[in-house]
Amino acid sequence: MDKVLVIIVTYNAHDWIHQCLNSVDMERYDAFVVDNASTDDTLSILHAEYPKAIVRAMDKNLGFGQANNIGLRYALDNGYDYVFLLNQDAWVEPDTLTELVRIAEKYPDYGILSPIHLNADKSSIEAHLLSYIANDKITDPTFVQDLYFNTVKEVYTSKYINAAGWLLPKNTLNTIGGFDPIFYHYEEDDDYLNRVLYHGLKVGIVPAARMVHDHREGSSALSN
């Protein structure tokens, strides 16, 4: 079985931590949590309720990219085949990681794969993903038509998908490395995507894999 490390960066994650962590099958996957100096009870919840999670508590807020880099370094040092970056305000369906890994192995030219992002009550596609569709970020012209007629392909090529849920194969980490620390918070995923595309790898969205992204005020792993 492929080794998959799920990396979650937290900051004052009380409202989401249970749904996020409970969605990760820790019998099959390892969870690596980097806490950005939370001032609520996030750390106490992690230590008391999730003993299988690997927790790294920071003494200051590193921002999204640099905190994720700690997990990426751990993955490379410990022989993981894949990492999955999961936002603290997001959670996955039971078969999401299995499906993403299957697609990654079938289509090795993809450097990043992401599930379909749904809103909190799963009543629609999450607003940010809708905006990417509206602004031609998803470059496959058949995407909307295939969704409408229920004839979806296994993966669709995109120029952009935010890092709320990214599967990164080991080859991507070896080729691209981590996030550039010049980006403290926001735009670090844009920069990473640009580097992936520069190196000839593709970015894909996998319709059969689903996740919820409860993107709202205060959900970010960064202090207001």
Image (spheres, rainbow, N blue to C red):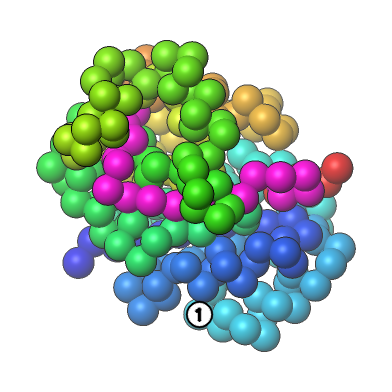
Q: Is residue 183 magenta?
A: no
**Residue at position x 50%, y 80% from top?**
52
In the rendered image, which quarter is residue 94 located in? bottom left
Q: Is residue 215 magenta?
A: yes
**Bounds of the magenta segment:** 203-220
Report x, y in % for residue 170: 31, 45
In the rendered image, which quarter is residue 43 located in? bottom right
Residues packed near mark 1 inside 10 Å, few (<14), some (14 to 19) or many (20 plus): few
Is 69 drawn above or below residue 46 in the view shown?
Answer: above
For the N terminus, the quadrant is bottom left
Task: Give the residue pinned by disc 1.
Answer: 52
**Residue at position x 49%, y 53% from top?**
122
Q: Nearer the viewer, residue 2 or 14?
A: 14
* Kind of residue indicated by mark 1: Lys
**Residue at position x 86%, y 42% from top?**
224
> Does the magenta stretch mainly form a helix, a strand or a loop?
strand
In the rendered image, which quarter is residue 185 located in? top right
Report x, y in % for residue 66: 64, 42
Report x, y in % for residue 159: 40, 19
